[in-house]
Image: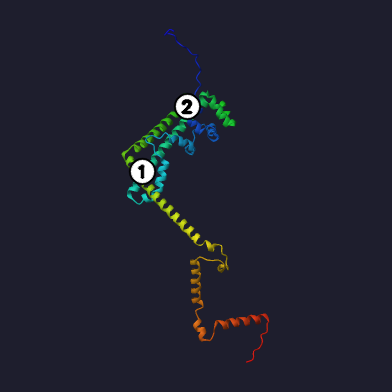
């Protein structure tokens, strides 16, 4: 086999890269009737309020943040849980202000990047639909979402590519500079020595609070077990009296401590309300005379005539 032999393959036409493959377009415009209708009817970029309210788009841009990775969700939760304690110390107040500054810089960078990406996507969408008109996949996607207004795109006249580039160049430069400036500030802040020191202190405080919470949970679980054990012991001790009904106390055997409690209560009640034996005996009144009087009263009420006794 000759070393000069060459192999040739037939050329294949490369498919034109469609805007439908762009992640920003997918999140902002694809299958979104509201944003596509806004573009077709106004031919202008999306408002910043609409861009920021798209949580998926903001989450996608958050993955592009420069500098070391910061877990903002965990940081917000930790600072919120320790806020009351941190506000009582000067160092805690300084740490809260430090992380407020971090969140402010991160928010400014995120807004600048969202505005730049949304405007860049608008520029590419305008060029594909109104100037080049060569993205069939994009036109099919838009027509599928808004078929009643997509037909306007084929008949709407527009300016040339150079004119459109001149119009958007200034805004693109402004947004690019704004995003670059915010990105530099955020990166410098996250890579500073102060950030490392504050983050180390925050991690130490989180570990300290977690240890304290772990001890509190253990003590709470121990108290709960003791309370359950006491309740079970009381139930077992009083199990013989649980089935008794009112008025049947004397018909069932009672534990000694319950019998003693009954006796003590009866003795206390007798001494409190019926402690007049001495006075009755002094007046010649006895319990037997009282019972005899009660029997006579009941017979008279029943209409029974008692025989008269001779004096």
Residue 96 visible at all:
no
- Residue 20 in the image, given as x and y percentages of width and height: 51, 28
In the image shown, does 244 or 154 lie closer to the viewer? Answer: 244
> Does residue 211 appear left or right of residue 31 in this picture?
left
Up/down of 14 relative to 221, above or below: above
Residue 119 is at least partly visible in this image = yes
Please provide percent x and percent y for residue 266. 51, 73
Quadrant in which the C terminus appears: bottom right
Residue highlighted by disc 2 = 164
Mark 1 lies on a secondary structure that is helix
Q: Residue furthest front?
A: 253
Whichever of labels 1 and 2 marks the residue nearer the N terminus, that label is: 2
At label 1, counting other C-alpha atoms closer than 10 Å, the crowd grade (few under 14, some 14-19, many 20 or more) is: few
Judged from the image, the secondary structure of the residue bearing numbered disc 2 is helix
Would you name the residue on which mark 1 appears?
A: 203
Query: Which quarter of the figure is the N terminus placed in?
Result: top left
> In the drawing, does residue 4 fall left or right of residue 303?
left
Rendered residue at 45%/32% (across/down): 117
């Amino acid at each position: 086999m000759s070393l000069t032999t060459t192999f040739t393959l037939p050329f294949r036409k490369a498919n034109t890269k469609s805007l439908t493959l762009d992640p920003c377009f997918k999140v902002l415009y694809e299958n979104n009737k509201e944003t596509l209708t806004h573009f077709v009817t106004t031919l202008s970029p999306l408002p910043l309020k609409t861009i920021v309210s798209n949580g998926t788009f903001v989450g996608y841009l958050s993955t592009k943040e420069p500098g070391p990775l910061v877990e903002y969700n965990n940081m917000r939760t930790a600072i919120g849980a320790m806020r009351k304690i941190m506000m009582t110390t000067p160092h805690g107040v300084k740490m809260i202000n430090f992380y407020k500054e971090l969140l402010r810089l991160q928010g400014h960078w995120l807004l600048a990047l969202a505005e730049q990406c949304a405007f860049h996507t608008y520029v590419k969408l305008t060029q594909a639909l109104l100037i080049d008109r060569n993205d069939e996949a994009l036109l099919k996607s838009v027509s599928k979402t808004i078929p009643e207004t997509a037909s306007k795109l084929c008949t709407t006249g527009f300016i040339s590519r150079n004119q459109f580039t001149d119009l958007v160049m200034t805004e693109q430069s402004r947004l690019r500079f704004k995003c670059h400036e915010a990105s530099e500030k955020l990166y410098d802040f996250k890579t500073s020595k102060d950030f490392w020191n504050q983050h180390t202190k925050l991690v130490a405080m989180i570990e300290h609070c977690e240890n304290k919470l772990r001890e509190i949970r253990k003590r709470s679980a121990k108290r709960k077990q003791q309370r359950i054990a006491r309740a079970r012991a009381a139930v077992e001790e009083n199990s013989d009296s649980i089935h008794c009904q009112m008025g049947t106390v004397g018909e069932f055997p009672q534990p000694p401590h319950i019998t003693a409690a009954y006796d003590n209560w009866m003795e206390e009640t007798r001494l409190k309300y019926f402690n007049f034996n001495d006075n009755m005996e002094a007046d010649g009144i006895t319990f037997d005379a009282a019972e005899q009087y009660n029997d006579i009263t009941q017979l008279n009420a029943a209409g029974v005539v008692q025989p008269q006794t001779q004096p």
